[in-house]
Image (cartoon, helix red, strand yellow):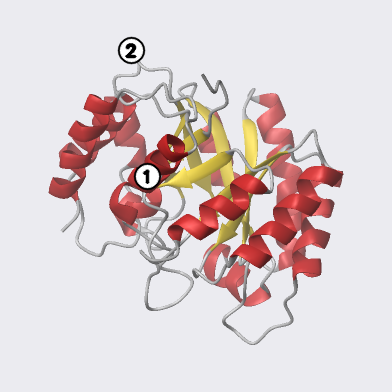
Amino acid sequence: MNTESLKLIECPRDAMQGIHQFIPTDQKVLYLQSLLRVGFDTLDFGSYVSAPAIPQLRDTDEVLDRLDLSETKTKLLAIIANRQGAKTAAKRNEISYLGYPFSVSEIFQKRNTNKTIAESIALVTELLEICETHNKQLVVYISMGFGNPYGEEWSLELVEKYCEQMIGMGVKILSLSDTIGTSNPASITHLFSGLIKAFPDVEFGAHLHTTPDTWHEKVLAAYNAGCRRFDGAIKGFGGCPMATDELTGNMPTEKLLTFMQEKKLKNDLDLLAFESAYNEALKTFP
């Protein structure tokens, strides 16, 4: 039996944030609780950002208060965009990871976090200190990691340069983010194979957005290049509302499960609980 597995990070926060109609707090709690029963490694459950920026997630603290974590092995990850958000999230013992979106695009960094790249780099230094003080781990998402829709300078080498800078600062988990769905097997292979070989002590993740006909080739390319950490969202719900007007969906979690079955990878998830969570997702998202 193949004992190798994938580390799956379920991203309901990413799925929820682009929905304009407010999802009631009660429904968020029901959905997140159903996901906690599945056995994912990590749940990207909410964000500590300004309410005007992401109004859908203004109730993150209340949601966290109401989650029952007594019978789950799943760790919680919260997205933050500034020092204050990080300090607020870091005080919550229930949270294991703080996630920060660092963009190789100046325009997107400004749209997403209201910071320049230089200011964002300085913030990462502060975030690492906050995480160390509060026994958290920082996950840095390399946004626009596979393309730039704004006409700015962009290259795979530029992405590699910023990854190397983050690692030099002390970041141990980097998730390469296909913010607008422009990745392809060649770019995925280039980045993951080169970075994983150069930095074997760093955990590299794939946060891939995709269309229904390209999911497999993207996952396969990342897997063959050595990536074992994958972000997904049930039915591919979501996308980044700060990037473009039209959202490109997340990697569907059910497709990742299909891939694991295809490769005969070890799967410790509760599949009945996943089916229940899948049904809850259909109720949660309009």
Look at 86% across and 45% down and name the residue there: 198
Q: Whole-percent x and y of residue 75?
A: 47, 26
The quadrant of the picture occupied by the C terminus is bottom left
Q: Is residue 224 left or right of residue 153?
A: left
Residue at the image position 34 percent from the left and 50 percent from the top: 57
Q: Is residue 254 above or below residue 208?
A: above
Rounded to the nearest angstrom, the CA distance separating label 2 from label 1 is: 22 Å
Q: Residue furthest top?
A: 70
Q: Does residue 70 appear left or right of residue 193 in this picture?
A: left
Q: What residue did someone put label 1 on? A: 253
Whole-percent x and y of residue 29? Answer: 23, 34
Q: Are marks 2 and 1 in contact (CB under 8 Å)?
A: no
- The secondary structure type at the circle numbered 1 is helix
Residue in the picture at 34% in, 55% down: 236
Within-10-Å neighbours for mark 2: few <14, some 14–19, many 20+? few
Q: The residue under label 1 is which amino acid type?
A: Thr
The answer to which of 93 and 104 lies nearer the viewer is: 104
Quadrant of the rendered image containing residue 121: bottom right
Q: Where is residue 221 shown, x and y percent of the image? A: 60, 54
Q: Is residue 167 left or right of residue 232?
A: right
Q: Residue, x 57% and y 49% (percent of image)?
A: 206
Q: Quadrant of residue 150?
A: bottom right
Q: Nearer the viewer, residue 250 or 167?
A: 250
Of the image marks 2 and 1, the number of the one nearer the N terminus? 2
Residue 165 visible in rendering: yes
- Name the residue that disc number 2 marks: 71
Graded by Cα atoms within 10 Å as few (under 14), some (14 to 19) or many (20 or more), the crowding at tag 1 reads many
Identify the image quadrant of residue 63.
Answer: top left
Amino acid residing under circle 2: Glu
26 to 252, vertically: above or below: above
Q: Nearer the viewer, residue 254 or 20?
A: 254
